[in-house]
Image (tube, rainbow, N blue to C red):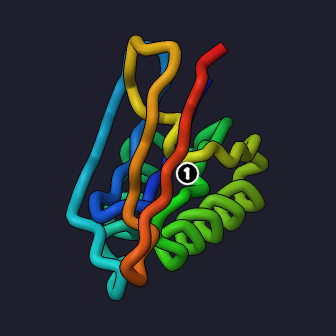
Amino acid sequence: MKILALELSTTRGSLAWLDKEIEFVREWPNDRKNSAAFFENLQAVRRQFGAPETIIVGIGPGSYAGTRIAISAAIGMQLSCDARLIGWPSICAMETDAQEYCIVGDARRKSFFFARAVQS
């Protein structure tokens, strides 16, 4: 299955491609005022690997603008290639062997959020 994952909710933008043996990841500084790097990387991955069958997009918490841009791009691609679209909480995508972990994040405007994740 050809899977494309998009994440723009943090200060590091990223996208990943997985197709059997092919694993490809791109990361870049995520400038919340200019999303050109995201679209350049997205275009390069589409040219190299073609259309995804599944698109997974990080839905935050995090940057509202970044999340909105990633979701909009994912919806547009889904419509153009009839891919399955999945929204996934960004804090649940962290790689860990722990069955339970806590996250503290910057909620902006001088506030923070706290979350507890439990893997089943």
Residue 38 higher or lower than 61, as above or below: below
- Tag 1's secondary structure? strand
Mark 1 crowd level (few <14, some 14–19, many ≥20, 10 Å Cα): many
Image quadrant of residue 97?
A: top left
Residue drawn at point x = 73 percent, y = 46 percent: 85
Residue drawn at point x = 68 percent, y = 48 percent: 87
The residue that disc 1 covers is 58
Mark 1: amino acid? Gly
Residue 62 higher or lower than 97, as above or below: below
- Give percent across and percent down for residue 84: 76, 41
Residue 43 shown left or right of residue 119 in the figure? left
Residue drawn at point x = 45 percent, y = 35 percent: 102
- Give percent across and percent down for residue 107: 45, 69
Q: Nearer the viewer, residue 69 or 98?
A: 98
Residue 36 higher or lower than 47, as above or below: below
- Give percent across and percent down for residue 118: 60, 23
Residue 12 shown left or right of residue 7 in the figure? left
The outermost residue toward the bottom is 33
Q: Nearer the viewer, residue 81 or 84?
A: 84
Residue 97 higher or lower than 10, as above or below: above
Residue drawn at point x = 40 percent, y = 50 percent: 104
From this viewpoint, is residue 4 visible? no
